[in-house]
Amino acid sequence: MDKLIIEGGVSLKGTVQVAGSKNSLLPILAATLLTKDRCVIKNAPDLRDTVSMLKLLRYLGSNYEFKDHTIVIKPNGTEKVEAPYKFVSTMRASFCVLGPLLSRYRKAKVSLPGGCVIGVRPVDLHLKGLAKLGTKIQVKEGYVHAETRHLKGDHIYLGGPFGSSVLATGNVMMAATLARGTTIIESAACEPEVVDLARFLIKMGAKIKGEGSPCIEIKGVKELHGVEYEVIPDRIEAATLVMAAAITRGEVFVKGARADHMMAVLEKLKDVGISLKILKDGILVKKTMRKFKPFDIVTLPYPGFPTDAQAQFMTLMSITEGISVITEKIYPDRFMHVAELNRMGAQVKREGPYAIVHGIKQLSAAPVMASDLRASAGLVLAGLVARGKTEVSRIYHLDRGYERLDFKLKQLGAKIERAKE
Ligand code: EPZ
């Protein structure tokens, strides 16, 4: 396993390119199961999760090539309808093959996703939506057994106790594309990645309206054809890179960042006192020596503040003098990074879904351990500003969702090295 060794104290400078969106690409890859034609997907980020999804699709009978951020993929006629535990347990997004398999082959056997450190990750909304489309569902021995004579459109409410569900919206939307009649999804997720999936499906010939709003209408069609498509930039990677520039009081142009996908994050950064300039092809973080102002965040479904940026913001709060409060409304247990930041001298107190951060002048280096994708990004940011050399271990978590983040930061002047643990 790899670790990162980061010597804090460098103000980052230069230009860095945002990669394609992981959370856009993964459901789009699942959607390639909906056609027997070849699909070409561009701006695909080179991540562990990308490879995990491609391996699952190969197991399900697709051939693919992945190079220079372009995936060429085509079912090879030996379709399987079972997604085994060994694939789904490593990556929850694999559960998104359920809708497409049902839609194409009228049956599927998909492992329930494993647990996850950020919290209980139920799939009840996925199953509720697919059942409403006329699927007979049985959950036994850790697998979802689903079959249908034919999927039939219906009016589905997909709201859960924590609001909308991104992947449940994707799963049901994909299943509805080849169902008979019209499906309306109420309380649909509005994330840009759901819009990107809808746009991919529309290009394949699906009839979808309302994507990006809480009400999506899908009119079933007979079949879908292959397409060429470019996924959107990764708004969470972009937010992480903007934060790296801001927290180190650097001057960095984050090329490709789409400000219109990041309004909640950018508004919050302005409140803190960070100087940003929105340009047509990215976001310029300008150097400022202004004192950061303490602030609060509440994580919410899009367009609210993204839970995937919560850990990174906690790091910023930890060196912002005063009291800042995080309310985690999506994953109330998504605080594995608290103990690790406190090892670096942060003063964070967790109370249920709340984290109260008492900002200090400076963090101090310590060996810390990554626990999940976004927590590891928060720890890397902490290492960039801590006094001394911080070692972040188990960074395979980071490599799941960030394309060579250490290399990108190094290009901006960070003293960061990857080493074997
Ligand atoms: C997506 O996960 C993202 N993953 C997550 O990003 C992100 O944190 C999450 O959306 C919320 O924005 C991908 O897109 C691959 P949800 P998803 O279903 O769709 C509850 C990352 O770091 N819920 O929107 O699985 C659930 O418990 C990852 O890139 C149900 O109750 O999340 C949560 O509280 C981490 N029943 C809330 O809804 C369900 O059937 C939102 O979850 C499904 C979800």
Image (spheres, rainbow, N blue to C red):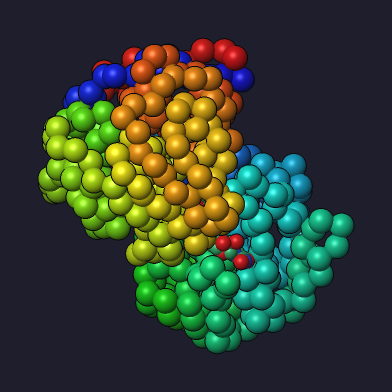
Residue at far right of view: 141
- List x then y, in percent, for residue 50: 53, 40
Number of numbered callouts drawn:
0
| Foreground pick, 328 / 19 | 328
Question: In front: 87, or 339?
Answer: 339
Residue appearing at x 39%, y 42% in the figure? 358
Give the residue drawn at x 48%, y 77%: 187
Is residue 130 visible to us here?
no
Image position, residue 67 (x, y; %): 44, 32
When the figure is inspected, residue 33 is found, relative to residue 254, above or below; the finding is below
Identity of the residue drawn at 38% across and 31% down: 381
Q: Can see residue 421?
A: yes
Q: Quadrant of the C terminus?
A: top right
- Seen in the picture, residue 317 relative to 224 is either above or below; the reply is above
Residue closer to the observer: 42 or 352: 352
Where residue 129 appears, x then y in whole percent? 62, 75
Q: Position of residue 1 (x, y in %)?
A: 61, 20
Q: Nearer the viewer, residue 262 or 299?
A: 299
Left/right of residue 115 with respect to residue 54 in the rendered view: right
Answer left or right for 319 relative to 222. left
Figure quarter occupied by ligand 1: bottom right
Image-quadrant location for residue 108:
bottom right
Determine which quarter of the picture holds residue 167: bottom right
Q: Is residue 354 above or below residue 373?
A: below
In the visual, does 73 lie left or right of 15?
Answer: right
- Which residue lies at the image location 55% right of the left edge and 35% below the top edge? 339
